[in-house]
Image (cartoon, grey):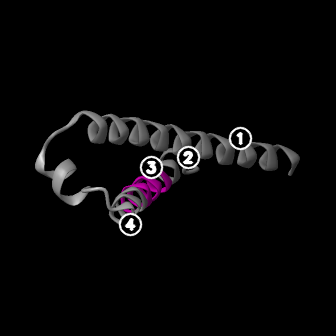
Amino acid sequence: MRRKYSETLIHFLSAIAFLLVWFLVFFLVSYFYLKISNSWVALGIFSGNLQNILGFYLAISLILILFSLWFASKFYKEK
């Protein structure tokens, strides 16, 4: 039983690390895109409205979290 608990803990911690890496990658890409890009997305949707920017981050973060949870469940599925 103890070994099963430690394996579950390792899987849980690695899933959290996976989520953090996804969020870091997303944050860096989004930051540099918004900082450098002069496209219509950066100028139109993100025209300084903090609510739109936070909504964008929350929507993409939710998608990444759901994808990461799905991937982790497939990757760590017991055979």
Q: Are marks 1 and 3 in contact (CB under 8 Å)?
A: no
**Which element is circle 4 on?**
helix
Residue kind at label 2, given as amino acid type: Tyr
- Which residue is painted at 16% across and 57% down in the image? 44
Q: Residues within 10 Å of mark 1 (few under 14, many from 20)?
A: few
Q: Which residues are magenta?
A: 59-70
Pick whichever, 19 or 40, lies toward us: 40
| Disc 4 target residue | 51
Q: Earlier in the sequence, mark 2 or mark 3?
A: 3
Q: Residues within 10 Å of mark 4 (few under 14, many from 20)?
A: few
**Which element is circle 3 on?**
helix
- Where does the image place residue 79, in percent across and percent down from the top left? 55, 48
Q: Residues within 10 Å of mark 2 (few under 14, many from 20)?
A: few
Q: Earlier in the sequence, mark 1 or mark 4?
A: 1
Q: Is residue 58 found inside the magenta-colored segment of the image?
A: no
Mark seen at residue 76: 2
